[in-house]
Amino acid sequence: MSFRGKRKDGTDHASDETDGHAPANKSSKISAADDSDDSDDIVVCEISKNRRVSVRNWNGRTWVDIREFYVRDGKQLPGKKGIALSLDQWNILRDHAEEIDKALAENS
């Protein structure tokens, strides 16, 4: 017999996880996006209709953010698809731009 999902002693331990405490409330991603302070964002360029490159300060650090955006209630909001490069990562990428261009030329 398979006891998938249950312990062998047969007791239900699901109530042990909460210890009488209610689960913590999770903040809404939408409200976090609406409350964000975009004053530190500098949009460098728009790659396409919904993609842009920006330089931003977040958690006391500077990031190069390449991200897709979506529209909700008339506001453009950042999506999950994208990458935020630290300054060290950005410098490495920038230093290898010629090699990337050569590889692109070879593959086209």
Image (tube, rainbow, N blue to C red):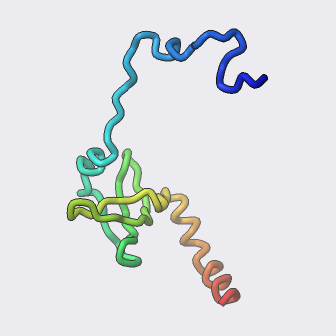
Is residue 40 left or right of 5 when viewed as pictured? left
Q: Residue reaching furthest right?
A: 1
Image location (x, y in percent) of residue 21: 39, 14
Residue at (35, 59) in percent of width and height: 78
Q: Is residue 46 above or below residue 37?
A: below
Q: Is residue 13 above or below residue 96?
A: above
Residue at (40, 55) in percent of width and height: 62
Query: In which quadrant is the N terminus drawn?
Result: top right
Residue at (69, 9) in percent of width and height: 9
Question: 67 or 45, which lies in front?
Answer: 67
Image location (x, y in percent) of residue 70: 34, 64
> Residue 54 sits in which quadrant?
bottom left
Q: Residue reaching furthest front?
A: 1
Question: 92 or 108, which lies in front?
Answer: 108
Q: Residue reaching furthest left?
A: 74
Question: 106 or 23, which lies in front?
Answer: 23
Residue at (36, 65) in percent of width and height: 69
Image location (x, y in percent) of residue 29: 34, 45
> Residue 46 sits in which quadrant?
bottom left
Is residue 101 left or right of 63 when viewed as pictured? right
Query: In which quadrant is the C terminus drawn?
Result: bottom right
